[in-house]
Image: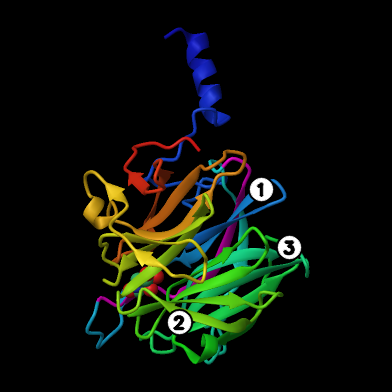
Amino acid sequence: MKKIEAICLLLLISIGCYAQIIPGAIWPDTKGNPVNAHGGGILYYNGTYYWYGEIKQGVTWRVPGSTWENYRVNAGGISCYSSKDLLHWKPEGVALQPVTTDSTSDLHVSKVIERPKVIYNKKTGKFVMWMHIDSQDYSYARSGVAVSDSPEGPFKYIRSVRPNGNMARDMTIFQDDDGDAYHFYSSEENQTMHICKLADDYLSHTGDDRRILVQHAREAPAVCKYNNRFYLFTSGCTGWSPNAASYATADSIMGTWTLHDNPCHGTDADSTYHAQSTYVLPVQGKKDTFIFMADRWNKTNLETSRYIWLPLTFDAEGTPGIQWEDQLMP
Ligand code: DGJ
């Protein structure tokens, strides 16, 4: 290669023309640090994507006396990154700060703060974050809510609840086209998923709370809508260890939901490519283009967990499919 060509190539790389999403690789943010946003979700607002996730930092330890693989890091709060193209992620700082002093606080570093999802409420002009809040032994089983005037935060924590009195662990929020929002949460000791419609301001639950996938023991819910049908992707319940995904469908969001097989295909489909679902991202400006977002946990060193983003496609019958790709160009 001639010197001038080499310089042009370097220039292209440095301005990001060759950038791709590499599932499972370290994804540097625009400052060169690995993106730290696990169990995350994405909000698209005003031409920008905002990625929120769990900050996992520092030493991983196993909670003494736990009979299951209860590995933990101190809760680091919730991070926020912004991007226009899904490739270059600018760190926006800590959107929701953990609490270091008051050990009774839901946000104390000793607690569990997981799977944050943020939606924007057009009526109130507020950004609303819901997340799984728990004690170290996961017996607290609640959902926390925080609010902000801007997408980057800072978010102000309001409270945690057991929706309609139900246990709530892994969760997601789905905002429908009409603005109504729904909370999907693993309940009843993770044996049964629930869907609950949120109030108009998104800050509390209505009494419309349905049991779905009853006794199917699913967690890590991620939801999308395609061709007026709702799709719910979940994992089984095996701690931080991966397992096979499944999906469920419904013609109306409150059900009836029907459980189907694994949407993943090819090598490592039975372990969701060594990962666990967290969100389905509709790519803006590209009709019917979705990215299946998952976490590849490293349970003994959670800080080094990585992200698996893969295309989610639908065939003519509306059957979803996920296939491994070494690189993804959104
Ligand atoms: C599985 C959940 O999906 C994760 O978010 C986390 O809570 C781990 N369990 C903890 O073992």
Principal SS element in the magenta part?
Answer: strand
What amino acid type should be assigned to the residue bearing mark 1? Answer: Thr
Q: In terms of depth relative to the viewer, which is nearer, 144 or 292?
A: 292
Q: Which mark is residue 150?
A: 3
| Disc 1: which residue | 48
In the rendered image, residue 265, in percent from the top left (x then y), is placed at 27, 46
| Disc 2: which residue | 168
Residue 42: quadrant of the picture: bottom right
| Residue drawn at 30 percent across, 74 percent down | 216
| Residue drawn at 54 percent across, 16 percent down | 8
| Residue drawn at 43 percent across, 73 percent down | 170
First reached walking from the N terminus: tag 1 or tag 3: 1
What amino acid type should be assigned to the residue bearing mark 3? Answer: Ser
In the rendered image, residue 70, in percent from the top left (x then y), is placed at 30, 78
First reached walking from the N terminus: tag 2 or tag 1: 1
Do the CB atoms of the residues marked 2 and 1 lie less than 8 Å apart?
no
The Cα atoms of the two marked residues, 2 and 1, are separated by 30 Å
